[in-house]
Image: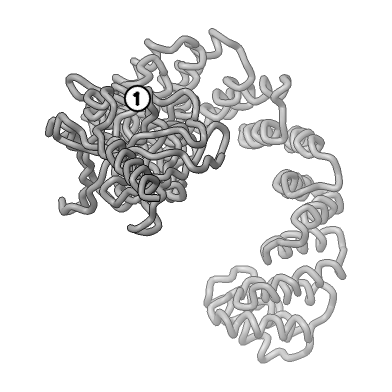
């Protein structure tokens, strides 16, 4: 029995001796990849301190998200005491408490190599803490449990006691490869530790939609770009409305530095400079526009993009003189170059928009018709051509109507709200062509397409067309609906009075007109119509008084009636 106890004690001592040993030889170099992290608030006060480590030699590192949450800026202090600023955040996840970021690059960088395969259950792993000493103290333990949290990403439970000072330190395998990062323990006395797999940490990134990521937005430090060039372009677009101008400009500078041959980056930076609207920034924008053309592999698309940029600039500059040669003539030249290289419908669509903005409706119509003869023809392009045709001097309304017919024909009944604007416009033109019943049919189709969600103005507009084709019952219903929706609109009550007057409902007309005058006692039309109604009912004195009031308010028609009835 005594011998057994001695053997057990010997075994325990041996085990203790093993755990107390230093780390394997690879730790001498590996320790240089582990650093201390200090995060700061905007007023430069220390927010948190903790650990992290490099995962590549270009300055990419990982740490715990809690350390960075709310931080305005941060630095890392390497094992040899060098302080390096954190440049930008590359990804974050608050659920698993991981953040990936980029620091300034060391002169002689050291990074930990990720283990190609996860450790097996029962395998010995080593904790590599931050240390400024060459002889790095360490400890080891065994993997007790492995949980899969996503494809090729694991979460480990390790038989090893750790404390808060070990959070975000790397856990290594026997070959000196990092397998994961220590996370905060549930309790200080726990004999188990939790480790997030390195695969999950390294896979963190920023994508096109990361602008709405709450975890990233809770960190005030600048964010990096998505690694994929196409994703980075979309991200630039998404962030253009979310970041202050200076911050967005910094993001554009990063994009151009990473992708110097992408012409879109220069165009977007030029757009950003244009919003600053002064000569110095316009000069920078001009240089970027030239550079975008120089690096573009598809010159037709580059000219097209430049034409769109100048179109937007000229559309919003108002009466202000253009900078340099940025006026409409340059805009036309650029779209012309694009079409000369590639005569495609999309380019003609923009050409039409440019000429339309210049009020050159003949050329605009010609450009839109080129689109309408192509596979790109749509309700929008037929409508654009109709607008240009209608604005041409001496235009034929029948031709305008034919184009609107083509626009509506792109939809299949029963119409949805996509067709509604074109139905409404066609109804307007039909009314002008005195095709009143057809116009009412289009207004009815518009109403159905909008599922009845229409304004008081719509009811008045339809009522006026209905009156023209003697649809009196429908007209009365519509004008009643209009005043129900907008009871404080005096003009709608005047319109209601006119409809009642037209169908010989003098009492109802008088009631509506008195309502109009109760709202607006300076409404000349209401006085005129009220006076006329009273004269028709034999109330000459009141009728003459109201006509006189209309004349005083400038109603010429009332003057003629006054002469007749006096």
Does residue 144 show up? yes
In the drawing, does residue 408 fall left or right of residue 243? Answer: right
| Residue 106 coordinates in the image, percent (x, y) | 19, 24
The foreground one among 508 and 143 is: 143
Residue found at x 71% / y 80%: 532
Residue found at x 81% / y 72%: 476
| Residue 210 coordinates in the image, percent (x, y) | 46, 41
**Quadrant assignment, res 319:** top left
Q: Is residue 101 above or below residue 284?
A: below
Residue found at x 39% / y 14%: 261
In the drawing, does residue 263 fall left or right of residue 453? Answer: left
The foreground one among 404 and 67 is: 67
**Quadrant assignment, res 447:** bottom right
| Residue 95 coordinates in the image, percent (x, y) | 46, 50
Disc 1 marks which residue? 176
In the drawing, does residue 521 fall left or right of residue 83? Answer: right
Instruction: State the residue lying farthest toward the left.
Output: 81
In the drawing, does residue 20 fall left or right of residue 416? Answer: left
Residue found at x 79% / y 35%: 410
Does residue 432 show up? no
Q: Is residue 334 above or below residue 208?
A: above
Q: Is residue 362 above or below residue 217?
A: above
């Amino acid at each position: 029995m005594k011998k057994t106890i001695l053997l057990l004690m010997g075994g325990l001592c041996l085990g203790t001796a093993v755990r107390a040993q230093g780390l394997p030889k690879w730790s001498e170099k590996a320790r240089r990849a582990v650093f201390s992290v200090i995060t700061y608030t905007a007023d430069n006060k220390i927010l948190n301190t903790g650990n992290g480590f490099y995962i590549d030699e270009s300055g990419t590192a990982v740490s715990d998200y809690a350390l960075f949450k709310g931080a305005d800026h941060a630095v890392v202090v390497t094992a040899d005491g060098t302080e390096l600023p954190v440049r930008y955040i590359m990804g974050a996840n608050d659920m698993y408490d991981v953040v990936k970021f980029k620091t300034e690059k060391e002169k002689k960088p050291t990074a930990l190599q990720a283990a190609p395969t996860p450790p097996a259950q029962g395998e010995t792993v080593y904790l590599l803490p931050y240390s400024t000493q060459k002889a790095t103290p360490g400890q080891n333990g065994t993997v007790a449990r492995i949980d899969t949290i996503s494809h090729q990403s694991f979460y480990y439970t390790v038989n090893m006691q750790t404390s808060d000072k070990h959070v975000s330190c790397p856990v290594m395998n026997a070959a000196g490869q990092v397998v994961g990062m220590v996370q905060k323990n549930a309790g200080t006395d726990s004999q188990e530790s939790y480790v997030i797999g390195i695969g999950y940490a390294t896979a963190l990134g920023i994508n096109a939609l990361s602008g709405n990521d709450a975890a990233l937005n809770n960190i005030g430090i600048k964010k990096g770009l998505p690694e994929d060039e196409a994703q980075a372009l979309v991200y630039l677009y998404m962030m253009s409305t979310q970041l202050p101008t200076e911050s967005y400009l910094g993001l554009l500078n990063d994009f151009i530095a990473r992708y110097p041959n992408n012409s879109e980056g220069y165009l977007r930076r030029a757009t950003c400079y244009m919003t600053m609207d002064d000569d110095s920034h316009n000069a920078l924008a001009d240089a970027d526009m030239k550079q975008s053309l120089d690096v573009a592999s598809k010159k037709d698309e580059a000219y097209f993009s430049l034409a769109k940029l100048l179109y937007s600039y000229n559309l919003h500059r108002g009466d202000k003189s253009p900078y340099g040669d940025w006026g409409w003539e340059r805009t036309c030249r650029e779209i012309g170059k694009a079409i000369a290289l590639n005569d495609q419908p999309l380019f003609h669509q923009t050409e039409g928009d440019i000429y339309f903005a210049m009020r050159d409706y003949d050329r605009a119509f010609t450009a839109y018709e080129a689109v309408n003869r192509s596979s790109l023809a749509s309700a929008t392009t037929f409508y654009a051509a109709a607008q240009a045709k209608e604005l041409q001097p001496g235009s034929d309304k029948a031709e305008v109507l034919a184009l609107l017919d083509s626009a509506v024909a792109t939809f299949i009944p029963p119409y949805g709200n996509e067709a509604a604007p074109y139905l409404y416009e066609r109804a307007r033109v039909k009314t002008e062509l005195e095709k009143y019943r057809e116009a009412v049919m289009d207004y009815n189709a518009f109403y159905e397409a909008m599922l009845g969600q229409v304004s008081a103005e719509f009811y008045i507009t339809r009522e006026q067309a209905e009156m023209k084709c003697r649809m009196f019952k429908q007209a009365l219903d519509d004008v009643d609906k209009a005043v129900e929706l907008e009871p404080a609109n005096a003009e709608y009550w005047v319109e209601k009075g006119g409809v009642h007057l037209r169908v010989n409902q003098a009492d109802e007309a008088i009631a509506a007109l008195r309502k109009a005058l109760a709202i607006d006692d300076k409404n000349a039309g209401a006085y005129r119509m009220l006076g006329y109604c009273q004269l028709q009912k034999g109330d000459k004195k009141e009728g003459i008084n109201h006509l006189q009031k209309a004349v005083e308010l400038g109603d010429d028609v009332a003057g003629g009636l006054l002469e007749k009835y006096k």
